[in-house]
Amino acid sequence: MRNRANMFPFLIISDYLILIRENKTWSEALRYCREHHINLVSVTTAATQSWVAKTAEGASTTHVWLGLRFTCTFRFWFWITYEQGCYQNWAQGHGPAGSEECGHTGAMQSGGDHRWVSLPETDKLNFICYTCDGK
């Protein structure tokens, strides 16, 4: 793994994930990832959850944005990459079993047990992108 932390103190790279330590709204984070990398990260397996959780530990915010969004029209959560999977890691009271509010998007706790939460998309958080700059 290449360590670019000294060259870019606002970035932490782990395999094909990159933590952007800038505070942006969910839409700004999505735009940034798509313009500079690939996309906001999707978490559809326990293995990916572990990988993303480790990357999130370097965040300067209590949560990091994921590529997870709630659609008010159809009333369900979806990954913006359209990946599918049965894996879920929602905190109690969030996601399908809890807060399903318009204007909410998914984030992961950057510490603790790294559960997913539903937050207003206007909050400003660090975020994780997929990148092509892996090992």
Image (tube, grey):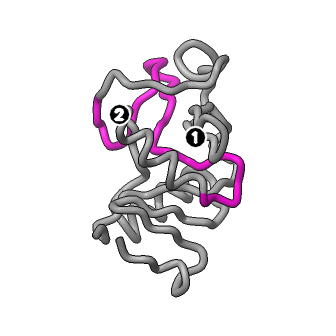
**Could you classify mark 1 by the number of other residues whose Cα lies within 10 Å: few (under 14), some (14-19), or many (20 or more)?**
many
Residue holding disc 2: 44
What's the residue type where badge 2 is placed? Thr
Q: Secondary structure at mark 1?
A: strand
What's the residue type where badge 1 is placed? Met
Going 46% across and 80% down the picture, which residue do you hit? 4
Going 42% across and 48% down the picture, which residue do you hit? 51
Q: Quadrant of the N terminus?
A: bottom left
Point out which mark residue 108 bears. 1
Q: Secondary structure at mark 2?
A: loop
Does the magenta portion include 60? yes
Please tell me which residue lies in front, 35 or 42. 42
Q: Which residues are magenta?
A: 58-84
Looking at marks 1 and 2 on the same chain, the residue that comes earlier in the sequence is marked by 2
Residue 2's x, y, as percent? 37, 76
Q: Is residue 110 left or right of residue 43?
A: right
Point out which mark residue 122 bears. none
Please tell me which residue lies in front, 10 or 123. 10
Residue 115's x, y, as percent? 58, 32
Q: Quadrant of the C terminus?
A: bottom left
Does the magenta portion include 27? no
Going 44% across and 77% down the picture, which residue do you hit? 3
Residue 28's x, y, as percent? 56, 59
Q: Is residue 38 left or right of residue 125?
A: left
